[in-house]
Every structure is written in C-alpha cells, then in structure tokens.
Image: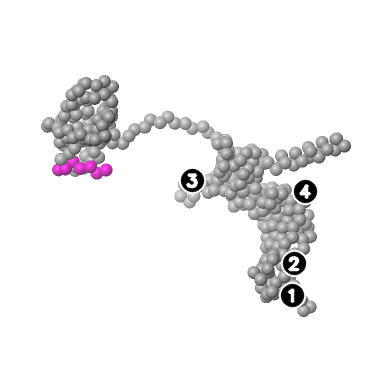
Amino acid sequence: MKNSKWFVMVSIAMLLLSQVFAQSELPISSPAVMRAYALKQVREVHASLYAPSIAQSGYDSREWLGEKPSPELLGEAGKLRLSAQTVDPNEVVMVYVSMTNADGDNLFYGYTETKPIKSADKWVLPESAGAISMRLSEVPVTFEKVVAQASILFRNADGVLVSEDLRFDGRKVFLPQELAGLSGAFVRIQFGDGTSVSYSASTGQALPTTTLGSQIVGSFRDIFSFRDADVSLTVASQGGRGTNPTIEIVRTAGGGLVTFTVSTSEGKKPIGFWLLRPGFKEWTRFETSGGTMAIGNFPIGTTYAVPIWNPVDFADKS
C-alpha cells in the first residue's frame, strides 16, 4: 500500500513538472510544432449553442486526465449533448466548441453558423451544424517564475526594430500562431525577479546574450564651468544670433580676483553680467568696462553668471 501511494505521488509530481516548459526553448519554430504542443495539453472540451432568441445557451463539457490523440479528442467532443429552446426557429444558430487545458486556457476552437431546417414537421439543426473544424488558438507556455512582461520583437518594413506585447498571466505566456517561425524575430520574457530570457521565433531556441557596458562621459550644452580660474569664453554667433551661455564659477578659496573676458565669435562683447552668488536667491547686475569685468574678493562656493548684451550686437536664439 505504501509503494502504491508513493507511486501516485511521484506520478502527480512528474505531471506537474511536465507542465512547466523548459526555458531552453519555446514551441514556436513552426505552426506544426505549436499545434503538437497544444494537443498534448488538451484536457477538456466545451461546447454551446447560441442565438439571440435562445434564453439560456445550451452547454455541455467533458474533462479527463492525461493526453489523448486528436481522434480521441474529437470523440470526446462527439459525446457532448447540446440542446436549447428558441422562440424563433428561423434564426441563425451558432455551435461553438473549444478545447482547453486543465486551467481552462483555450487551445483549439471552432464554430458553425446554420439555420434550423424542418424535418417531419419538426425544427432541427442540420448535420452540418456539428461539422466543426478545430483551429489553433493561443498556446500557453508555463515558466518556473512569475512573468512581468512578454513581447515579440521584429523589424518592420523600414528595418526598425519594433516591439508588440504578448498576453501573459502569472507564470504563463500566451503565444499566438502568427509568430511561429518568424525570421529575424525573437520573443523576450521578463520575470518578476528582474531576470529575462529571449528566444528565436524561427527556431524556438534561447538566444545567447552579449554583455555591453558604457562609462558615461557627459557634458552640458551651453554651460561652461571655470574652477579656480578666470572666465575666458568665446560665444558662437552668426549674424548677431547665438545661444547665451550659462557660466559657472567654482571657487575653493575666497578672497581672490576673478576677471571675465567674454566675446562673440564676431567680436562683440557683453555690456554686463547677471550674477547669482552663493547663498543668494536674487541675481545682481554688474556692468563691464570695455567688455571686460574684474571682481575682487570673490566668494567661495559656486557663482553663476549670464552675459548681458546690447541687442544690436547679440540676441539669444535658444
């Protein structure tokens, strides 16, 4: 008895493990592969009759344990008994069938739309109503970790790499048949723990990664910094127009003299400067003499300066 219980527990464990797809590949190398993978997961069949005049949809379902080949799956569908009452027998009736996994995820579906016919003074659905061709829906793949994002990346007609989201829920990603075998495309899965993996859409194999890194060597546009030095700057201009700079003066020791020598590339000089000194909230205007300026007892810390120009000589275009 103990051995029997142990065997049952091991069998259940193996079944659960088999439902977690190996992360080394995805079943997307072709539509044929996707269909085979989906067939192995079918555990339930559901069907219903529907028409607007039917007050309550006729419904039936069956479920089982373990895999079944496709003829047996259709045999399970054939055991369903559907019936519903309608007040309008001239109405088109839909017969819908879906095959799902044990979680209720739709794997295959099909439907017909037919009108009842009169036979022996009774309204009945023709045999063609049940002649349903099952087609593949999305294929759910279960991962070992919770999925945070799933997407398919491919190049559009302009050669630009674009991304489209895939449906996911918990540890599952739902793969549409349309992405199977796409050349040059890949599926990217990002997990809740911050890790990610990518798969080739043409082979289903996990793609190797290449580590890239960069050290930031940044710069500010139109900001010029002078540390423990005089200010000497030429402002680019064309036809008296350019970008008025922000000048940053950093002093590590106070009390020294700082001279300002600023001109445009066309030889024009400012008539003054606005200064924002350390600890101050208001800007102070200083006038230049011959286009230059010198300030003694310059404060320690960071001072900001903005040149003031005669509008005839220079105008800010930024």
Dot placed on the residue nearer the N-terminal end, 4 or 1: 4
Amino acid on which the number 4 mark rests in the picture: Leu
Q: Are marks 3 and 4 in contact (CB under 8 Å)?
A: no
Label 4, on which residue?
65
Amino acid on which the number 1 mark rests in the picture: Trp
Q: Residues within 10 Å of mark 2 (few under 14, many from 20)?
A: some
Q: Label 1: state its secondary structure.
A: strand
- Choose mark 2 or mark 3, whichever is in front: 2
Nearest the viewer among 207 and 230 is 230
Label 1, on which residue?
123
Find the distance from the CA under tag 3 to the CA under tag 1.
56 Å
**Which residues make up the magenta segment?**
311-318
- Choose mark 3 or mark 1, whichever is in front: 1
Dot placed on the residue nearer the N-terminal end, 4 or 2: 4
Q: Label 4: state its secondary structure.
A: loop
Dot placed on the residue nearer the N-terminal end, 2 or 1: 2
Label 3, on which residue?
161
Label 2, on which residue?
83
The residue positioned 63% from the left and 43% from the top of the image is: 171
**Can you say whether 244 is above or below 292 in the image?**
below
Q: Residues within 10 Å of mark 1 (few under 14, many from 20)?
A: few
